[in-house]
Every structure is written in structure tokens, then in C-alpha cells.
Amino acid sequence: MSGSATLGFVGIGNMGVPMAAHLLAAGYDLIVYDVRPEVAQAFVDGHGGRRADSLADLAESASIIITMLPNSDIVEQVVFGGGGGSKDRLIDALTPGKTIIDMSSSAPTRTVALGAKLADLGIELVDAPVSGGVKRAEDGTLTIMAGGRPEAVARCRPVLEAIGERIFETGALGSGHAMKALNNMVSAAGLIAAAEALLIGRRFGLEPDVMIDVLNASTGRNNSTEKKFRQFVLSRSFASGFSLDLMLKDLTTAVKLGHDTDTPAPLSSLCRELWAAADSQLGEGADHTAVVRWLEALAEVSLEALPNSDEGQASEAS
Ligand code: NAD
């Protein structure tokens, strides 16, 4: 399919920009839409492709439509309308045989319901959320977890391969979204655990930079100790490109999945509560790594490099 199909991409945000850019680089004809026309236009000016004037315009041109949107509410609004916003929606121009790939981190049960509604109209839905963050989206090395009918996933595979490095077929529709929420629950718990260790260690007199080195060479290592603390916390940038409210959404999805499946998951619930408290304190727009700022305030100790310490230089250099 590479290069010949017209693809539509809805949601030109932190992740959408690099993902859509990889589709253009793979030779696809691409039409993009964002509720903020200026970001869609900036993408077209910088990378190429065309900007759709409306969702209906995009649905008419594209045979496969990718959504990379904040949550299930917005995915459903984009497809079927509602929510008190504009009357523009994809469904008005979607004809049978077209496919939607929802690459957002959506709620699995809602994905299953959306898929059933679309199937009645002859439209296929595949869920294919991603892991790896903005950096790996830029590098084209995202992990993708794809759920849906095997034939549908197979049809979408070349598109997914243009965006990601490892594509896992997780099972029926919704399984990708379930897996994504569970992954982020593990990731969020790892970040909090490492932050608490660093705060305790600092109070005892250990240097954060030294602790990160030791953790990364030891069994306490995780993705946050390797890819987040030095880069976004010790550097004080708190700018990973993944917002705290999106992380909280994923944790809420994971905890609900625990309830729905009658699985006791006390640590997951506590972890979600911590992130919810941080979200309400830090407010809209906070990066998810800023959860450490909130923990620092609770502990009344900062991981910031001490003045005249060479720790700050080491952080900046990484
Ligand atoms: P983002 O907020 O940067 O981008 C979302 C985009 O959707 C924005 O450009 C916004 O204007 C657009 N949008 C919102 N409502 C819309 C509507 N009604 N119609 C059209 N466009 C609309 O978010 P992001 O960080 O790119 O994340 C997107 C999805 O990917 C989320 O579900 C998130 O949980 C998931 N995700 C993010 C990361 C990350 O590191 N940022 C990593 C993996 C998964």
C-alpha cells in the first residue's frame, strides 16, 4: 500500500507532528486536520502534505484515517460529532470500506463500542496506540500495539511500520488500548518509586546525579531513571512533551480496567491517586515529569543541583 493510498491524520499535536512526518517520508499522500488550523498549517508548511478544511473534507479524500487525539471523548466527537462543538465530523463523508486507526491512548471499552457502531456502517476500526514518547516518535522507533480483526490489522501494517519500529498484534479490537494503559501504569509507578528513592537519598545526603548513575547500573533501573530524571527533572526543564493530564487519563483507564475485570490492584489505585493529587495541584499544562516537583514539595526537599555543585553541569550535558 506504501505510497499509493491517501491517508488522513487527525490531531497534529506533540506526537502527531513527528508521526505524520514519517508517513510523508514513506511516500504517502497525506491530508491533515487539527481543531487548531494554525498547527495543521504549520505542519504542511514545514513538512508537506495538504491541510483539510474540515473533518468531512479529510474523510472524503482518505481511505485510511489515523486519529492521534487526547482521549476517547474527543475521538468519538471527531468520528460521530456531539459534545456541543461544531457540526463537522468524519462520519458524514466516510464510505463503507474505509478504515480508522485510533493511535490515541483511548479507553478500551469505548473503543469496542465505537468499533461496533462503525462496523454497522461498513467502516473498520483498528486500535494502535504507541509507546516511546516524542523522542521515539521523531526517531520513528515507537512501539505500536495493534488490536482489531487480523485482516484489518494486516492491511494497516505498512502504515504502522512507517511510524513505529516494533508492531505487536495484541488481539481483538480494544486490546491495544488496554495494553497501552497497563504499560503506562507500570511506567507511572516506576517514576514515582524512583522519585521517592531520590528524595529519601537526598535527605540522607546522597547526590541525585550519583543515585541516578547507581540505579541505572543496578536492579532499580527503569525507563524513568534512564530516560527522564537526568533529562527532564535534574535539568529542571520538566518538558518531556507528555502532559500530566494525559498520564492521569491513562492511569484512570488502567484502574477502571482493573475494576471491570474484578482484579484487585491496590498499588495501581494508590498510584493513580498520587498522580490525581499532583494534577490538581500543578494545574493544566504541567508536564508529567513535574509530578516530581509535587513530591519535592511534599518532602520539602529539592533534587535541584546545589549551587557550585558540578552536578548541574552533568545534567545539562546529558
Ligand atoms: P497533544 O495535546 O499534544 O495533541 C493532541 C492534538 O489533538 C492537539 O494538536 C489538539 O489541537 C488536537 N485536537 C484536540 N481536539 C481535537 C478535535 N476535536 N479535532 C481535531 N483535533 C483535535 O497530545 P499528544 O501528546 O500528541 O498525545 C496524543 C495522544 O497520544 C494522547 O492520547 C496521548 O495519551 C497519547 N500519547 C502521548 C505520548 C507523548 O509522549 N506525548 C506518548 C504516547 C501516547
Image (cartoon, rainbow, N blue to C red):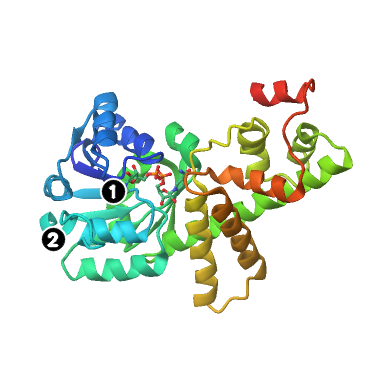
Residue 19, located in which quarter of the rendered image? Answer: top left
Name the residue located 43 percent from the left edge and 59 percent from the top edge: 176
Foreground: 286 or 70? 286
Can you give x and y, in whole percent of width and height, for residue 84 in the image? 23, 61
On screen, residue 172 versus residue 280, left or right, reads left
- Label 2 element class: loop
Task: Report the disc number at residue 66.
Answer: 1
Q: Quadrant of the N terminus?
A: top left
Name the residue located 72 percent from the left edge and 24 percent from the top edge: 312
Can you give x and y, in whole percent of width and height, for residue 299 in the image? 76, 49
- Label 1 element class: strand
Residue 78, located in which quarter of the rendered image? Answer: bottom left
Q: Which residue is identified by label 2?
A: 96
Measured Cα–Cα span from mark 2 to mark 1: 16 Å
In this rendering, does residue 156 appear at all?
A: yes
Name the residue located 36 percent from the left edge and 68 percent from the top edge: 110
Confirm or deny contact between disc 2 and disc 1 (CB under 8 A).
Answer: no
Say whether disc 2 or disc 1 marks the residue closer to the N-terminus.
1
Given the current orientation, which residue lies at the most extreme right position? 204
Can you give x and y, in whole percent of width and height, for residue 61 in the image? 12, 45
Name the residue located 61 percent from the left edge and 67 percent from the top edge: 269
Query: The residue under label 2 is which amino acid type?
Result: Pro
